Image (cartoon, coloured by chain):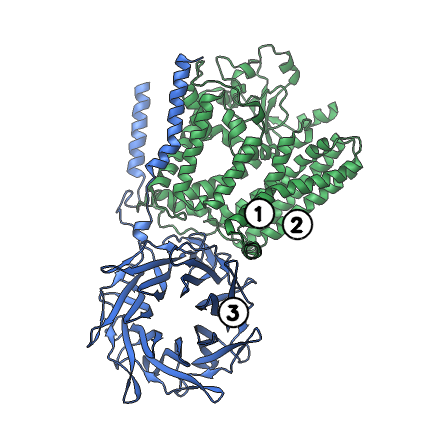
Chain colours: A green, B blue
Amino acid sequence: MDIEKNNQDKRKYDILQDEATTSFFKNRKTQFLFQLPAVLFFVLVVLAGFFGIQNSNKSLTTISIWVIWWSLLLISLALVGRAWCFMCPFGAIGDWVQRRTFYKRVNDTFSLKRKFPAKFRNLSLAAILFLVITWADFQFNLVNSPLLTAYFIVALLGLAVIISIIFERRSFCRYACPITGLIGLYSMFAPIELRAKDKETCKACKEKYCISGNEKGYPCPVFEYPGTMEKNTHCILCSECIKTCHRNNISLNLRSFAGDFLNLKKTRMDESIFILMLLGVTIFQTLIMIRPWAVFTRDLMIYTGASYDTVRFVLFITSAVIPILIYSIVIAFSKLLIKKTSFKDIFTGYAYSIIPLGLLMHLSHNLRHLLEEGTGIIPALSDPFGFGWDIFGTSGYMPAPVLNNNNILLIQWLLMFIGLGVSISIGKKISGRMFHDNKSAYIPVLIFVLIFFIFNLWVLGQPIMHKH
Amino acid sequence: MKKEKRNLLIIIIVFVILNINLNGSALSSGVKSNSLQWFPSLAADNGTVYIVWADERNGNYTRIMNNQPHKAGDIYLSKGSFQNGWTFDKNIRINEIKGTTGHGSPSIAIDSGNIYVAWEDDRYGFEELYFSTAKENNITFKKDSPVVEDAGSQVLPSIEVRNGTVYATMMNKKTWDIEFTEGISTNSVYKFDKPIRVNDDPAGNWHYAPSLAVDDEKNVCIAWLDARNGNYNIYFSHGIKENGIWRFSTNMRVNDDSANVSHYTPSLAFENGSVYIAWYDDRNKDFDIYFSRGRFENDSWKFDSNIRVNDDEIGDQMHPEIVVRDSEIFIVWEDGRDGGSDIYFSKGMKKNGRLEFIKNTKVNDIKGKHYDPQIGVIGGDVYVAWQAEVKDGGDIYFSDGKYDGKTWVFSSNIKINDDLTDSFTKPDPVFLGMILGPVIVSIIIVGFLRKYGH
């Protein structure tokens, strides 16, 4: 076991070994310099949504948020984990209101510092908000409305501010951000991690400034303790622990993809259910954009007499629930093969192996939007309000797909096969590590993974309409 | 040092402002670019008119199709009513997702208080027909759905509705055939039959621009442009539903001229056992509008001699639309007699037992190029909608014609599309207040509790 750990450590490269990098992260202004442009751009996006052109194909608001940002977020999760959280405007503004400073370390924060309610200290609230926002997206056609998108951003910002002034630290980011579950779980795939260099040093450390904070930095805003942290899920890469650790025991490692899954010891039911729900919602979001959906929902409306909104809502909830139900049945079969292990442990253990497939499914869906519709940002940047401006001389640019349909489909399939391969590899390793090398228990899960893989291949191959 | 930094910042800002727009007017014009509106279709009902059209107000170049950037668009509708003059309601988008679909050729029909619209749509990358309905007294269109079950390539719909049943003809771009389908509502949702072929010639000939009318017995009459004989002729077929199966009659040629003449875009109407067809052809070298009436006699359809509708000898006349009420025939068309393209109108009358068309009347009163007129008649009013290139690529215009005892007089032309006023909005202060209010209240309460509370 130690040999394996040492081998894994050898395959990592700590970018904080470099002094310049360390001082970069230790500097309190660093994060602010990333947050400020993000906040200013979000202000522009909101103003464009409120006062600019309401044509979603020409609006900076809809193109930058739903086509560019959302797609790049998923790509960044796969490549650099929760790096977005480092500059996220919602977290930044919450922090600024709470701390009443942009980057300085202050002791007296503007907050009641309440503890977040215990029953919500999991992914349940995030899951509900994620489902609500996904529903609102298609119900109110959020992605096609600059005005509604601007309202949505302001409302979310309001929620972030209210939570930050009532509850301690970044409770919003940890428990209430609608995408915290998604980005937390997907970031486990990323080839980057923030960890304690040596856990024994953490154990021996009496001060534990990473938890309590000191004059150089705040206590971990998301209540993590690097000494026991073994996955990326909650770490927002804010670098406060790098600043506070007086033993320089924090490392920012480059590692292999999907590194978190190789060492996972603690698994959680809320995260497992979120993974499965996400799988279903991801497929649903593609399903509603393909042609067979139009025919299928029309027939359902005929047979049931229900309205389209009702049919779509029921199918949405079904799509979120069905993977959980099927997976439960699958795990029941696995349980027959590993009698000594509890159903819950098998359920949660194997659930994480689905993340790479889910992430790359999600990525392949949004990659199409990015490659087909992303160039719409070029004229929008020159004329963000649609007033006829031509700031960068690109307002007359005619957006066109970067790649043709066949090439995009090829990339999507490639990503899907990578996701499948990594998922299967992780599933087998989880069998070895958590279930006494009982690989036969993975066979039902493998069938589950293959079913979703093949179904998604079919979905991606269908004629699909644009988001904008 | 601080001063130096500030100066440097000022220099950077000035530099950016000066250089940010090397290519022209950074904060220019304020003139909003107009969008294209085209392909109008009109239906009239008790002093109310409904006009649908293809509209690029939300469009953008988002797809490459046939190696060309393809501009997306939508289908819009406006309802017009007469109250001390014609007023048209705010334009309503019919298709579900705006700006994502290709656009084209909407066809509208009204029946029993409902509005029915079918149109070309390429939301999935190929052209096909979509369909939606709304109630006249509460125009909210239902979820649109494809007319043809299998992903196909149907275009150019022409629809009629009788007692809630939708009859549609279309061109199949893959086979070049004219097809027909019938749509029936279950639980207020329409499902169409598998389309059947109307033309009876061998496969491979080109057929185009079908026009449909429903007869008294809910059978259908369809006319179309047909290239089976090499040149383009106008053909007709009559469809009858027997034992639940539609059967179409042997195709009949409608135009009676000799070969080497091309005939285009027929428009068809039906009343009291007669079918009325107008089209344009070049038998007189330039294009003229021609008309023929057909009746079912001795087990087959017979068409009268063709009659020229336009009364000029020069200029091209194209794209006629016909409507018949109480045996009166009304036709509008594009007319190039004045050198440009205008909209003209005529009415067919019996004179000495012979059908003649009255002196042609110009419908448009504004300069520009005018295309694709559509016509509806209710009582003594003739309603005309068309596309006009007046200031930009195209807008939809409307006029109401009345007979004053001597001649037909058309009202001042009214622009229907409101794309310039529709593109911008402002946040609702009340709604915004409902979002920001709790934040401000929370900050005040937290401030109070921190100061005076526990």
**Where is the N terminus of chain B found, in terms of image quarters?**
top left
- Mark 2 neighbour density, 10 Å: few (under 14) some (14–19) many (20 or more): few
Residue at image coords 30%, 52%: B420
| Mark 3–mark 2 distance (CA, rounded to whole Å) | 35 Å
The image quadrant of residue B412 is bottom left
Q: Residue A315's mark?
A: 1
Name the residue beneath numbered marker 3: B181
* Quarter of image, res B371: bottom left
Q: Position of residue A81 (x, y in %)?
A: 56, 32
Name the chain under label 3. Answer: B
* Front residue of this view, candidates B126 and B220: B220
Residue A439 seen by the camera: no
SS assignment at label 1:
helix
Most foreground residue, A26 or A330: A330
**Label 3 with label 1: CB-CB less than 8 Å:** no
Q: Residues within 10 Å of mark 1 (few under 14, many from 20)?
A: some
- Does A432 sit left or right of A278 as displayed? right
Please, what secondary structure does the residue beneath circle 2 have? Answer: helix
Structural distance between the alpha carbons of marks 3 and 1: 30 Å
Q: Is residue A149 above or below residue B42?
A: above
Query: Which residue is nearer to you in this view: B201 or A252?
Result: B201
Q: Which residue type carries mark 1?
A: Leu
| Amino acid type for the residue under numbered disc 3 | Thr
Query: Horizontally, is B26 left or right of A305 in the view?
Result: left
Residue drawn at point x = 42 percent, y = 61 percent: B114
The image's mark for residue A454 is 2
For marks 3 and 2, give the one nearer the viewer.
Answer: 3
